[in-house]
């Protein structure tokens, strides 16, 4: 579908995906740092 392939929509979808990814990553990073501080 041509409308779905427009750069603006692709950027929006990609932006939402990366935002979700980085949010999950930062949460797991925080958990990892907490575990390290407990055991190191």
Image: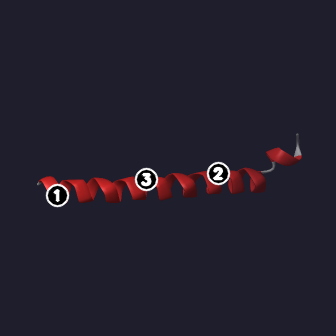
Q: Nearer the viewer, residue 4 or 37?
A: 37
Quadrant hosting residue 15: bottom right
Quadrant hosting residue 2: top right
The nearer-to-camera label among 1 and 3 is: 1
Could you tell me how far apart the alpha carbons at marks 3 and 2 are, in whole angstroms? 16 Å
Q: Residue furthest top?
A: 1
Is tag 1's residue or tag 3's residue first in the polypeptide sequence? 3
Q: Secondary structure at mark 1?
A: helix
Quadrant hosting residue 29: bottom left
Q: Nearer the viewer, residue 8 or 22?
A: 22
In the picture, the quarter occupied by the C terminus is bottom left
Could you tell me how far apart the alpha carbons at marks 1 and 2 are, in whole angstroms? 36 Å
Is tag 1's residue or tag 2's residue first in the polypeptide sequence? 2
Could you tell me how far apart the alpha carbons at marks 1 and 3 are, in whole angstroms? 20 Å
Q: Secondary structure at mark 2?
A: helix
Which disc number belongs to residue 25?
3
Which disc number belongs to residue 38?
1
Residue shown at the point (41%, 58%) measured from the top left: 26
In the picture, the quarter occupied by the N terminus is top right
Classify residue 17 as left or right of residue 8. Answer: left
The residue that label 2 is drawn on is: 14
């Amino acid at each position: 579908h041509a409308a779905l392939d427009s750069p603006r929509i692709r950027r929006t979808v990609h932006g939402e995906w990366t935002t979700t990814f980085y949010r999950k990553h930062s949460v797991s990073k925080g958990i990892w740092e907490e575990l390290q501080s407990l055991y190191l």
